[in-house]
């Protein structure tokens, strides 16, 4: 095989390995939140690639991802996209795996809980997505596209993504992005144009491309997201959409032509500091909105999850007032929002008690929540009917009072 995955340290590499050596990124402070100063969202960040260093090569990006080990399916490592990822992280040890899906010592070891966040930063997985399925949705998007990645380098305490693969769930990059794009193209061709407007979009079929990952972080690793943005820019009947908690200025260098919707997820800073581990500060997500719109994205907001705790309504008021003060008029003119109340999970609650128990003080509220058996048999909890309905109504009133320009696409 032309590109059998490398194994071992850089000095063990085969002589034909084309990648230049690089210094190992400084991983001190690896779990720190991003400071506003780390993010350069200015006009010059839209300069052509190559004119200035990419954000993904910056110290701030290395604090998010400081990859030391890549677990790789051999075929994935040998593919063009796999080779690109290996070249991005030249010092990483490469360990072949039979399947990206079952890596027992990585995903299944509860004992890893102490190292959970570190694994997210230091380990990547390369695999090929075997089954490509587009599923109907109808809320956030019309369709859920097959993901180009699975897992996340961030560690929000309420996140459902890690539950799917086990305990530690670092990013798996799916290297067969060409098949995913071909699949989407065929799906879209079968659909034809959207003939009836709905709350997802009046004219375009909306495909969520980031159900199980955060595309802004995925774009630090490979060009999968860039390829998807480029594909959707050519499809006038469709629109890509993804939610994000991370500001990656490199996405401003793409040319989405209005066919990709970025949904910046927002919550009061007090909640975010406690729950959104390793994400960009909420303020910087809001500050980025104008730049993303100017770069050709549609910019929406996810007001989620809404976490009920003493003072929650006051803090959401402050957040909405801040948005009203700082967002440019063109952003307001096209913005829409999803409002989603917190759902939690019994298994995740137990897991969080092992690494971030303070989060559970606000996430686990048996006095307000009721259990519901999920499709996979685990127990989810959500706010009781009356509690939830009242909170949704309060959110609607707060938006109407403080950010009346913000159309709520749906709230539940
Ligand atoms: S950013 Fe999204 S995918 Fe990543 S941990 Fe947070 S909620 Fe999960």
Image (cartoon, rainbow, N blue to C red):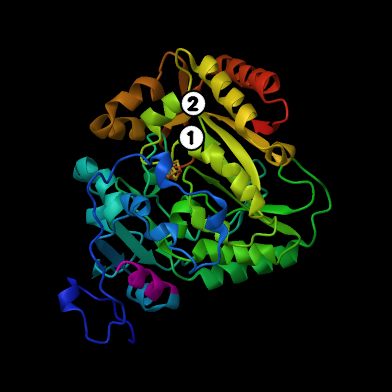
Disc 2 + disc 1, Cβ < 8 Å: yes
Q: Residue 44, located in which quarter of the rendered image? A: bottom right
Circle 1 residues within 10 Å: few <14, some 14–19, many ≥20: many
Q: Is residue 189 left or right of residue 105?
A: right
Residues drawn in magenta: 81-89
In the picture of the structure, the residue carrying the numbered disc 1 is 282
Residue 345 appears anywhere in the view: no
Of the numbered discs 2 and 1, the one sitting upstream in the chain is 2
Residue for badge 2: 268
Q: CA distance from mark 2 to mark 1?
A: 8 Å
Q: Helix, strand or loop at disc 2?
A: loop
Residue 91 placed where, x, y %? 24, 68
Choose between 409 and 291: the one closer to the eye.
Answer: 291
Q: Is residue 87 magenta?
A: yes
**Could you tell me residue 94's position as x and y percent?**
25, 69
Magenta span main SS: helix
Nearer the observer, 337 or 388: 337
Q: In this rendering, is residue 282 above or below 68?
A: above
Q: Quadrant of the C terminus?
A: top right
Which residue occupies 57% across, 58% down? Answer: 46
| Place of residue 391 in the rendered image (x, y in percent of width and height, measured from the top left) | 58, 18
Residue 197 percent coordinates (x, y): 81, 46
- The residue shown at (48%, 69%) is 50
111 relative to 262 in the view: left or right: left
Q: Quadrant of the N terminus?
A: bottom left
- At x 38%, y 43%, the residue is 163
Check if residue 246 falls in the magenta segment.
Answer: no
């Amino acid at each position: 095989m032309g590109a059998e995955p490398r194994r071992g340290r850089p000095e063990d590499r085969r002589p034909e390995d084309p990648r230049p050596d690089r210094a190992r990124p400084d991983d001190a402070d690896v779990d720190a939140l991003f400071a506003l100063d780390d993010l350069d969202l200015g006009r010059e960040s839209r300069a052509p690639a190559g004119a200035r260093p990419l954000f993904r090569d910056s110290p701030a990006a290395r604090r998010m991802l400081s990859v030391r080990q890549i677990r790789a399916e051999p075929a994935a490592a040998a593919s063009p996209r796999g080779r690109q990822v290996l070249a991005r992280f030249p010092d990483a040890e490469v360990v072949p795996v039979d399947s990206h899906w079952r890596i027992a010592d990585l995903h299944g070891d509860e004992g890893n809980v102490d190292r959970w966040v570190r694994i997210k930063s230091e380990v990547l997985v390369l695999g090929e997505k075997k089954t490509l399925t587009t599923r109907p949705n109808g809320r956030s998007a019309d369709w859920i596209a097959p993901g180009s990645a699975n897992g996340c380098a961030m560690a929000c305490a309420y996140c459902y993504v890690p539950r799917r693969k086990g305990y530690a769930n670092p990013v798996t990059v799916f290297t067969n992005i060409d098949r995913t794009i071909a699949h989407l193209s065929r799906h879209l061709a079968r659909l034809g144009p959207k003939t009836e407007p709905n709350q997802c979009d009046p004219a375009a079929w909306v495909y969520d491309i980031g159900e199980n990952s955060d595309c802004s972080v995925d774009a630090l690793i490979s060009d999968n997201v860039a390829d998807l943005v480029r594909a959707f820019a050519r499809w006038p009947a469709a629109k890509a959409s993804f939610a994000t908690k991370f500001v990656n200025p490199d996405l401003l260098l793409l040319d989405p032509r209005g066919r990709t919707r970025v949904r910046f997820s927002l919550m009061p800073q007090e909640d975010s500091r406690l729950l959104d581990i390793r994400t960009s500060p909420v303020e910087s997500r809001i500050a980025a909105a104008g730049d993303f719109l100017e770069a050709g994205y549609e910019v929406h907001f996810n007001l989620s999850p809404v976490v009920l705790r003493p003072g929650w309504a006051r803090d959401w008021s402050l957040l909405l007032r801040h948005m009203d003060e700082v967002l440019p008029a063109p952003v307001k003119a096209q913005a829409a929002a999803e409002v989603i109340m917190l759902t939690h999970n019994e298994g995740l609650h137990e897991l969080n008690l092992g690494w971030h128990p303070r989060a559970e003080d606000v996430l686990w509220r048996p006095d307000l929540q009721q259990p519901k058996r999920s499709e996979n048999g685990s127990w989810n909890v959500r706010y009781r009917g009356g509690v939830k309905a009242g909170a949704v109504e309060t959110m609607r009133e707060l938006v109407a009072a403080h950010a009346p320009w913000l159309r709520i696409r749906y709230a539940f």
